[in-house]
Amino acid sequence: MPNEAVLSAAGLRHEAQVPRAARASRYFQAMSIFMLAVVLVGFSRTLFLRPLFQVPAIPWYAYAHGSVMTMWFMLLVVQSSLVAAQRTDAHRRLGILGAALAVVVVILGLLITLKIPGHFKIVGYTSTGGPPHLTSLPTAIRALWGDIGTLTFFLVLVATGVCMRRRPEVHKRLMLLASMTMIAPALGRVTEFPDLSGITVAAPTVTVLLRIVPIGIALGLPLTLAAYDLRGSRRVHPATAWGLLGFVGVAVATRVVIPATAVGEALWKALG
């Protein structure tokens, strides 16, 4: 009968959509778990397991920043898991916490970033070892502006994602991209994990590779979202495309263009 045919077709479409939705949830959940794992491993030595290692003292705001960032990635895992479990009601309620947490992330991030010139002035620069942003003055200025750009882009992505919360396909991509912008420091600190410390001292070539690989991973993470889009719909979602363009634009502007200008150096001198 015609009605039975319509119902059957609708049922087939629904069955086809469920596995697709499940695959989507698995991707976003897996990426959030991966980034949380990177944060836990990367900051294990300098934050979570400090009593077990001989590491320099850090100020209170560094503890606060590390704790808030960890909370952000933990919340990302919870939120993606709630969506995977089809608990969108709880997901929406926790979204309020996420928005507030994002603001705190930016405030504490800026507090640390704006102290880079003063720290550089006290410590000076070293050509071997130490944080990468202390290898030279130009590199330190690029780090300052790069961090400012990253925090600004993170806030823009989160704010836009919150405004687009009623459009799930846009919302989840923007929130994931926002988290990907903040993962680079944790990836970089994975090389400081105790099991790798001996390698970095013994083999300078490996040291260089261990510093390059995290950068490559940080740049490659947003591309996995584009690959996910292409696999699912054979086109890159507009939110993903704009996010990737933003990644490139912010990186070029804040790490190449602005640091080379008088404005870039003026901010450094004003803060130092």
Image (cartoon, rainbow, N blue to C red):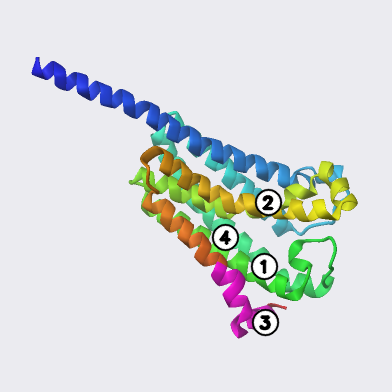
Residue placed at 79% from the left, 75% from the top? Answer: 121
Could you give the CA–CA distance between mark 1 and mark 4, rounded to whole angstroms? Answer: 16 Å
- Tell us which disc is closer to us: 2 or 1: 2
Q: Is residue 55 left or right of residue 167?
A: right
- Tell us which disc is closer to us: 1 or 4: 1
Q: Which mark is residue 270?
A: 3
Could you give the CA–CA distance between mark 4 and mark 3, rounded to whole angstroms? Answer: 21 Å
The residue that label 4 is drawn on is 106
In-front residue for pair 90/235: 235
- Tell us which disc is closer to us: 3 or 2: 2
Residue type beneath disc 2: Pro
The residue that label 2 is drawn on is 214
Could you give the CA–CA distance between mark 3 and mark 2, rounded to whole angstroms? Answer: 31 Å
Residue type beneath disc 3: Ala
Q: Is residue 33 left or right of residue 57?
A: left
Q: Is residue 257 magenta?
A: yes
Residue type beneath disc 1: Ala
Disc 2 and disc 4 in contact, CB within 8 angstroms: no
Q: Which mark is residue 143?
A: 1
Q: Is residue 217 visible?
A: yes
Could you give the CA–CA distance between mark 1 and mark 3, rounded to whole angstroms? Answer: 16 Å
Disc 1 and disc 4 in contact, CB within 8 angstroms: no
Q: Secondary structure at mark 2?
A: helix
* Mark 2 or mark 4: whose residue is earlier in sequence: 4
Which residue extends farthest bottom? 262
* Mark 3 or mark 2: whose residue is earlier in sequence: 2
Disc 4 and disc 3 in contact, CB within 8 angstroms: no
Q: Secondary structure at mark 3?
A: helix
> What's the magenta region?
252-268
* Mark 2 or mark 1: whose residue is earlier in sequence: 1
* Mark 1 or mark 3: whose residue is earlier in sequence: 1
